[in-house]
Amino acid sequence: MNQPQLESIANNILAEYQLNPVRVELCTTKRRLGVNYPTRRLIKISSYILGHPQVEDTIRHEVAHQIAYDKHGHGVGHDYRWKALARTLGASPTACASSSDLPTPPTRWNFTCESGCTFGYYRKPTAILSRGARCKKHHLQVRQTV
Ligand SMILES: [Zn+2]
Ligand SMILES: [Zn+2]
């Protein structure tokens, strides 16, 4: 999935509702997978989930927010009106894309110890890569995994 594809998913849905199109931008936030700025007709999607199946759900979730705003104005949030829209659009009508119960995007730099500790980083952990590190639990040398 890429930005033009996401934008066309969003705007195809909005066209069906005879609403004005939105702009879809990518952002680099990790905790919030998607966000809608209804008055600016802007949706931002975290680029970290472009390769995830989750991204389809997220774009539909945010489009549902836009439609909810266009129809009902501010204050809809995730109430029954939004939920009905989300269901119609095929988004799971439950978690908000900013909530912590969505899967976190995978980290780029991942390490493991012999006894099975795993941890990862979004940014290149130069200290670990150059000097190595031991896990906190077993004090074992960790190695990089893919
Ligand atoms: Zn939401
Ligand atoms: Zn360990």
Image: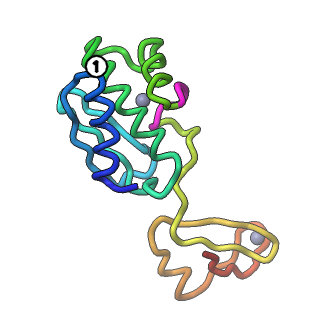
Three-letter amino acid code of the residue under disc 1? Tyr
Q: Element at badge 1?
A: helix
Q: Residue 83's spot in the image, x, y percent?
A: 48, 19
Q: Residue 4's spot in the image, x, y percent?
A: 28, 52
Q: Nearer the viewer, residue 93 or 27?
A: 93
108 in the magenta segment? no
Lateral position of residue 98 relative to residue 21, left or right = right
Q: Residue 47's spot in the image, x, y percent?
A: 38, 55
Q: Nearer the viewer, residue 72 or 8?
A: 8
Residue at (20, 33) in percent of width and height = 21
Q: Nearer the viewer, residue 100 or 62?
A: 62
Q: Looking at the magenta stretch, what is its main secondary structure?
A: loop
Q: Which residue is mark 1?
A: 69
Residue at (30, 35) in percent of width and height = 12
The relative height of residue 26 versus residue 124 in the rendered view (above or below) is: above
Q: Residues within 10 Å of mark 1 (few under 14, many from 20)?
A: some
- The magenta region covers 92-97
